[in-house]
Image (cartoon, helix red, strand yellow):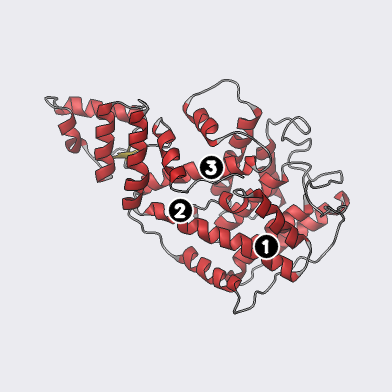
Amino acid sequence: MSEAKFNHYDLKLVEPAFNSSLTDLVIELDYLRKKSLGGSTHPKVFFQLKHIFHTLESIGSARIEGNNTTIAEYIETKLIETKTVPQGIKEIQNIEKAMAFIEENVEDYPINRFFISEMHKMIVDGLLPPPNGEGDYTPGEYRKVNLKIQKSSHQPPDFLKVEEYMTELFDFIAKEDSPKYDLIKAAIAHHRFVWIHPFGNGNGRTVRLFTYAMLVKTGFNVNVGRIINPTAVFCSNRNDYYSNLSEADKGTEAGLLIWIEYVLKGLKEEIEKIDKLSDYDFLRKEILLPAIAHSLDRKYITDNEAKILKKVVEKQVVQAGDLKAFFIGKVDAEVSRQIRKLVDKKMLIPEKDGTRKYVIRFDNNYLLRGIIQSLGEKGFLPVHD
């Protein structure tokens, strides 16, 4: 690789040709953005899946930077409390917290320096700075040194120019252009952030969350029932990610268009794949029932619990009367007590607060291992090279 050098070019929108495959992608994604999901999966079940995908995204974002924590290892930390948290686990937990911060705040606040600084502080919180860890000496503050990016022929700008370039970037994303440019802008902004490399460390983790924030703000809103998992776009194959970033580093319109198409194509594939989970028939057959079988096979749940959970999955929403057959000879009060035990074990959750109707719970108990297994077998997990 030739010696890295800084190559300034102006930050601006690019226009794909009307007859290009990129324009087709923009149109298809705009349709997906406006399309109401309205699937048959209960919202209480769907949002548990959303939380799982946030976890997977956090793991993927950390792994692309060299964190070797596996999905299985991290899932165990959800199930078993430990007093000491290894740095690799802490790094992933930080990303999850930053995702929650985005969801709680991005609709009400602009994506500006303050917003990004808060995210960066969360991402590096409690982590040792390099070379011993993935923290930063100046959390939330722009770098005061010049940097080199590993495996890149691009040299980020001098640290004295970072403030100016970042202000330009925030102005770029805040400018009210036609909505048809929203996703093109998000892709350009992702590259520009990496190109600037504003922080001493943690730029990769920050930029992926920055992009997530832009997607939510432009209408791919998880809170109305869609899961976005940019992990699959940016983290599944790091070689593809870096080679497409390098195309954009050239500063040519052709290079930027290659990068934008890479981002939007991955986003479309991911949205279409994950939207399958809103079809409860698919979710029941392909994910939930196999997860129960997996959990029973490994003795995480009892035979009777497995039968009850299968019934719950079959009906999606149950009440005490639906489960009486599993408690032969028991009075109603005892049936209610048994249901309460399953709620306490985090296997059932009330459909709504204060009601006596229940749906399956799998986001924070031993069923989670089986859910992850089923999602992996059906191609929903990021594949790391």
Q: Determine crowd level at label 1: few under 14, some 14-19, many 20+ residues with C-alpha closer than 10 A.
A: many
Q: Which residue is mark 3?
A: 56
* Quadrant of the rendered image containing residue 36: bottom left
Q: Amino acid at mark 1?
A: Trp
What secondary structure is marked by label 1? helix
The answer to whether 293 appears left or right of 234 in the picture is left
Q: Amino acid at mark 3?
A: Leu
Pointer 1 residue: 259
The residues bearing labels 3 and 1 have C-alpha atoms spaced at a distance of 24 Å
The three-letter code of the residue at mark 2 reads Ile
Quadrant in the rendering for residue 144: top right
Q: Report if residue 219 is visible in the image.
A: no
Q: Residue 366, how many percent across, how many down?
A: 40, 30
Mark 2–mark 3 Cα distance, whole angstroms, equals: 13 Å
Q: Secondary structure at mark 3?
A: helix
How packed mark 2 is, by other alpha carbons closer than 10 Å (few <14, some 14-19, many 20 or more), is: some
Residue shown at 43%/65% (left/top)?
35
46 and 380: which is toward the camera: 380
